[in-house]
Image (cartoon, rainbow, N blue to C red):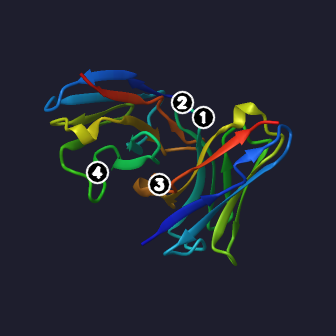
Amino acid sequence: DIQMTQSPSSLSASVGDRVTITCRASQGINNYLAWFQQKPGKAPKSLIYAASSLESGVPSKFSGSGSGTDFTLTISSLQPEDFATYYCQQYNSYPRTFGQGTKVEIK
Amino acid sequence: QLQLQESGPGLVKPSETLSLTCTVSGGSVSSSSYCWGWIRQPPGKGLEWIASIYYSGNTYYTPSLKSRVTISVDTSKNQFSLKLSSVTAADTAVYYCGLSGSGGPWGYFQLWGQGTLLTVSS
């Protein structure tokens, strides 16, 4: 199985901050990596697919980068609606696996 | 537009079999463009993929649950389902159904249902 490790597990940031979350795969995943945002009591929502492609309707303040085993989600200017938990997921092979999540909180 | 809606019993007793259904609207469960799956999230914890099924009938399961899980499609009702046998308290979670593309860069969960909470308790 491919293990996905996210860091940090949580972070505190202020409105307007640039935030970066990292996801590392235990082996290469051909850039088949997605990022999701989840708010309390809600289903996850896809933000980025194929490591760097922005999902339709998602603001351009979200961006993804990386290749091979190391990937990054960046929020360019954090807004109040961005405080949530973020997950990465590999879909290169089965079983599909998620990172453990990164909770972005207000400082 | 495509929408997914889970339905389930809400409460199941230990050792019983839980059955969950996802109703697909705005699209066909028979489409070759899609793969259908289930993901769960225990209270306060992260996401765990459970199973996926393709239009071809090919199925995939997470190893830790493979002996207890069955995913299936009912084309007549435009639904897909999950059965999990011999449940324990550890199976208490919000269960989401999801849609992914059938391959390549689109094989991620593009669409999720709202989720249904399943509690295992006597």
For discs 1 and 3, the disc positioned in front in the rendered view:
1
The secondary element bearing badge 1 is classed as loop
Q: Name the residue under label 2.
A: B45
The answer to whether residue A92 of the structure is visible from this angle is yes
Relative height, residue B44 to residue B41 (above, below): above
Query: Looking at the picture, how far across and down is residue A60, in whole percent?
Result: 18, 49
**Chain ID at mark 3:** B
For discs 3 and 2, the disc positioned in front in the rendered view:
2
Q: Quadrant of the image for the C terminus of chain B?
A: top right
Query: Looking at the picture, how far across and down is residue A84, in whole percent?
Result: 35, 36
**Chain ID at mark 2:** B
Relative height, residue B121 to residue B82 (above, below): above
- Residue displayed at 50% across by 36% down: A98
The secondary element bearing badge 2 is classed as loop
The answer to which quarter of the image holds residue A12 is: top left
Distance between the Cα atoms at labels 2 and 4?
A: 27 Å
Q: Name the residue under label 1.
A: B42
The answer to whether residue A49 of the structure is visible from this angle is no
Query: Looking at the picture, how far across and down is residue A65, in whole percent?
Result: 26, 38
Distance between the Cα atoms at labels 1 and 3?
A: 24 Å
Residue A53 image label: 4
Residue B107 image label: 3
Distance between the Cα atoms at labels 3 and 2?
A: 24 Å
Is residue A33 left or right of B27 when viewed as pictured? left
